[in-house]
């Protein structure tokens, strides 16, 4: 594809446009997209027009732009995340019904925890996680599990980079983080009080594929003073069920 004066390919410019959307920013004007993408206004408007014609973006009656249904459809075709979600959802539903707290499914994506499913309960406490939202690996129970079982180069990158505090109890000490990761691999779960919200405790377990590799994390957000033993047992059973379901599916 042709390069822009800045050296970006067309694909890279399209990604910059799409990356301006987030869970908190679902509708924008073309001008806002241009500013947030860092692209020249004429370039941003042209790309937006092309994506609207292709159905990847949609315009409302006020000419504001949102992600299109065709983009969602394409993302689901053959997606490993969709297959994982479909296998996990029945087990997550059972866990959530029994414990009545937020239950979440996350995968590793670009050195972050990407949440592909979340079930909630009206009586559940605080939780900032959203479907298709991301959290730092070091600052969430799901992320800690994914980091603990991730490749060695991932661990080196995270331990060698900035450990930004999301709350006053987020792990920001590299020595402490390394010890926590070793503990997770030893016991097979994590309990992370206050790492995201001071009033909550995150707990998480790994989900393995047929070959035993960790491909996701199943987590729950509990009130800070809630017992964790029972919910952990529920998560472990669900994780085993999800792994068995994935192994039984035709490839």
Image (cartoon, rainbow, N blue to C red):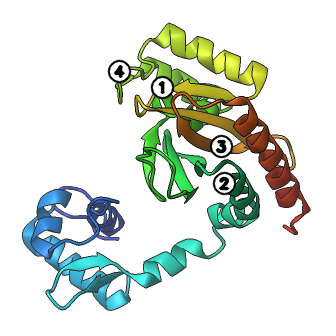
Residue 207 is labelled as none
Quadrant in which the C terminus is drawn: bottom right
* Badge 2 vs badge 3, beta-carbon distance below 8 Å: no
Rendered position, 165 above or below 62:
above
Q: Earlier in the sequence, mark 3 or mark 1?
A: 1
Circle 1 residue: 158
Local secondary structure at mark 1:
helix
* Badge 3 vs badge 1, beta-carbon distance below 8 Å: no
CA distance for labels 2 and 3 = 15 Å
Circle 2 residue: 96
Q: Residue 96: x percent and y percent?
A: 66, 54
CA distance for labels 3 and 4 = 24 Å
Circle 4 residue: 168
Residue at the spot x=29%, y=70% of the render? Answer: 2
Q: Looking at this view, name the residue that lies furthest to the top.
A: 175
* Badge 2 vs badge 4, beta-carbon distance below 8 Å: no
Circle 3 residue: 217
Q: Residue 99: x percent and y percent?
A: 67, 48
- Decide: few, some or many residues near mark 2? Use Cα within 10 Å; few <14, some 14-19, many ≥20: many
Q: Earlier in the sequence, mark 4 or mark 1?
A: 1
Local secondary structure at mark 4:
loop
Local secondary structure at mark 3:
strand
Residue at the spot x=80%, y=54% of the render? Answer: 242
Q: Earlier in the sequence, mark 2 or mark 4?
A: 2
Q: Earlier in the sequence, mark 2 or mark 1?
A: 2
Q: Which is in the foreground here, disc 2 or disc 4?
A: 2
Local secondary structure at mark 2:
helix
- Decide: few, some or many residues near mark 1? Use Cα within 10 Å; few <14, some 14-19, many ≥20: some
Q: How many marks?
A: 4
């Amino acid at each position: 594809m042709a390069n822009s004066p800045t050296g970006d390919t067309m694909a890279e410019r399209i990604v910059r446009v799409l990356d301006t959307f987030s869970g908190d920013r679902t509708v924008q004007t073309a001008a806002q997209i241009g500013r947030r993408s860092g692209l020249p206004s004429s370039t941003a408007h042209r790309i937006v027009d092309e994506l609207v014609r292709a159905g990847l973006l949609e315009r409302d009656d006020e000419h504001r732009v949102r992600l299109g249904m065709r983009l969602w459809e394409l993302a689901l075709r053959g997606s490993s995340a969709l297959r994982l979600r479909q296998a996990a959802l029945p087990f997550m539903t059972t866990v959530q019904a029994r414990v009545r707290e937020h239950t979440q499914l996350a995968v590793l994506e670009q050195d972050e925890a990407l949440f592909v499913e979340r079930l909630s309960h009206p009586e559940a406490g605080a939780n900032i996680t959203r479907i298709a939202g991301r959290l730092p690996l070091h600052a969430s129970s799901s992320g800690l599990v994914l980091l603990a079982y991730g490749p060695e180069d991932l661990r080196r990158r995270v331990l060698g980079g900035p450990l930004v505090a999301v709350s006053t109890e987020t792990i920001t000490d590299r020595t402490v983080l390394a010890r926590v990761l070793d503990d997770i691999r030893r016991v097979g779960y994590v309990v992370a009080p206050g790492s995201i919200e001071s009033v909550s405790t995150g707990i998480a377990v790994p989900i393995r594929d047929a070959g035993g590799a960790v491909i996701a994390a199943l987590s729950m957000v509990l009130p800070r003073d809630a017992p964790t033993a029972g919910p952990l047992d529920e998560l472990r059973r669900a994780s085993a069920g999800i792994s068995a379901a994935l192994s039984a599916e035709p490839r």
